[in-house]
Amino acid sequence: MLKVWFLETRPQFLLLSVILAFLGTSIAWCYHHILHWAYAILAGIGLVLTHISVNTLNDYFDYQSGVDQKTLKTPFSGGSGILPAGRMKPRQVFWLGIITLLLAAPIGLYFIIVQGWLLLPLLIVAALCVVLYTPVILKRHWPEWSAGVGLGLLPVLGMYFAQTGVYTASAFFAAVPSFILVHNLLLLNEFPDVIADKTADRKTLPIVLGKKKAAIVFSVFTIGVYLWIIGIVFTGIAPVWILISLLTLPFAFKAIKGSFNPDDMNSLIPAMGSNVMVVLGTQFLLGVGYILAVVI
């Protein structure tokens, strides 16, 4: 039974939170030469707990709306499949999501006490993104922003604040790629779900714009990540070492190419896999770049 509960957290996707924690901590070390290992680990645990809450609550609401039973399952989208298979009860999944969010709350409170109350607005916005995403935000136009903010921009800034107790313009510029990358992670993964999502009155970009135009948006945002990274280096905002993140460009081109064949699963699924490599690899290499700027 414990294995089923573990699988319901969708552990294969939690690596994103670990990398976000690594990136935010690396940025803080680069700009402030501060590295509190205990703070990094504790804040990272809070972030992973929050991510588990996102995954499980999304599964619960998808099942309740009937979307889960209609969604095409892929290695990268379509939910855990545990509720449709009857391996857990809906209320168990719901409470797993609520409890993990509540477990993350004391960690956030601790950092508010030790580092400052300015963390509170960030945590409130992040919590709202978690709780409201499936039942509310998905039914508004351009819901992908929520994932980009709640599982991209804010985690990086939160990890940075946990180390430094401040927000800076440099940290914000460094966190923007995470917003774009996580936004695009969700966007491409929505392509196979268009028919199912329509039945729940969702307003994802592939539904509102159509898949071809959504692919253009995806491509522009993907290219924009690399242009942003180059831009903050050449304006002196970020160290030159972060240019190593451009090594993921070949995966980005594969993802873009596949996005323009959204109805061919033999093309789209490899594109989704390449996009995962872009999202995880680019952010990991950005973190490595910020560390290299300190140690070399």
Image (cartoon, rainbow, N blue to C red):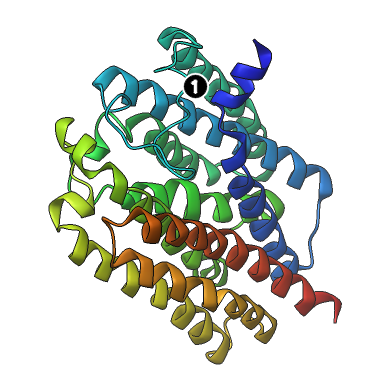
What residue is at 48 percent from the left and 86 percent from the top? 231
What residue is at 26 percent from the left and 55 percent from the top? 263
Give left or right: position of 252 versus 78.
right
Which residue is situated farthest in the bottom direction here?
A: 234
**211 or 205: which is nearer to us?**
211
- Element on which disc 1 rests: helix
**52 or 3: which is nearer to us?**
3
Q: Is residue 218 above or below residue 77?
A: below
**51 or 264: which is nearer to us?**
264
Amino acid found under the numbered disc labelled 1: Gly
What residue is at 59 percent from the left and 59 percent from the top? 280
Q: Is residue 20 above or below residue 212?
A: above
Looking at the rendering, in which quadrant would you find the N terminus? Answer: top right
Q: Quadrant of residue 290?
A: bottom right
Q: Quadrant of residue 167?
A: bottom right
Q: Is residue 52 above or below residue 64?
A: below
The x and y percentages for residue 148 are 41, 53
Give left or right: position of 171 versus 59.
right
What residue is at 51 percent from the left and 70 percent from the top? 169
Looking at the rendering, in which quadrant would you find the C terminus? Answer: bottom right
Residue hosting label 1: 97
The x and y percentages for residue 247 are 62, 78
Q: Quadrant of residue 10?
A: top right
Give left or right: position of 113 versus 175.
right
Give left or right: position of 141 versus 243.
left
Q: Is residue 290 above or below residue 236?
A: above
User: Within 10 angstroms of label 1, few (less than 14), some, or many (20 or more) residues?
Assistant: many
The x and y percentages for residue 281 are 62, 64
The x and y percentages for residue 173 are 50, 71
